[in-house]
Image (tube, rainbow, N blue to C red):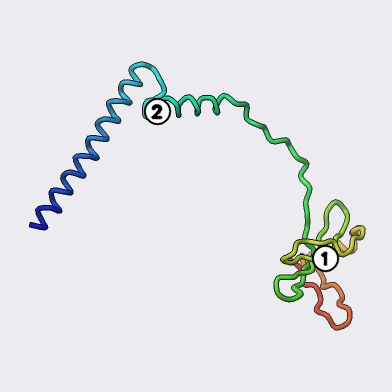
Amino acid sequence: MPDLLIALRAVVALAAVLGLLLFLSKRLQKSQAKGGDPLAALLPKRLTALLSRRAARPVAVPRARKKEKITVIARAGLGGRAQLVVAEFDGIRYVLGVGDHGISVVDTQEAPIPDEETVDSGSTGETPDLPSEGGERALKPVA
């Protein structure tokens, strides 16, 4: 008896799904015969009107921005989620304190101009450690 109920329930569910598919296909065929939007035939008229109004709005075009590069020179963990970061942007180096509270600028200075000798000797791609003061850990270069 329970097997018969399960089979009957499956047949009814299958019939419902097939009936829904048949209904939607007929509705799509009618809208295509009229030359309308096939998706509009599936949606209620109020929703179709709302979507057409939204589509008529002008789309904001993003402005072309000048690509400026921010380079992280070095960073060091200070405990927990706090970090000290040295970043370079537009020829200025910033020493930033980064933590849960946010980001604060500790110091700024002009970035050193690379000499030809420095560029040639620095061809390994590694940044030297910045000197540490008072026995604190040195900043680690970012790879």
Question: Is 81 positioned to the left or the right of 120 in the image?
Answer: left
| Residue linked to disc 1 | 122
Q: Residues within 10 Å of mark 2 (few under 14, many from 20)?
A: few
Comes first in the chain, label 2 or label 1? 2
Q: Is residue 143 visible?
A: no
Question: Is 48 positioned to the left or the right of 113 in the image?
Answer: left
Residue drawn at (48%, 24%) of the image: 49
| Residue linked to disc 2 | 44
How far is disc 2 from disc 1 in space, using C-alphas?
67 Å
Residue with the most extreme bottom position: 135
* Quadrant containing the N terminus in the rendered view: bottom left
Residue 43 higher or lower than 94, as above or below: above
Residue with the most extreme front position: 46
Disc 2 and disc 1 in contact, CB within 8 angstroms = no
Residue drawn at (82%, 62%) of the image: 104
Amino acid type at circle 2 is Pro
> Measured from the top left, where is residue 117 in percent x and y?
90, 63
> Measured from the top left, where is residue 30 in percent x and y?
31, 20
> Measured from the top left, where is residue 27 in percent x and y?
31, 25
Question: Is 42 positioned to the left or the right of 130 in the image?
Answer: left
Residue drawn at (72%, 35%) of the image: 63
In the picture, residue 13 is in which quadrant?
top left
Q: Residues within 10 Å of mark 1 (few under 14, many from 20)?
A: few
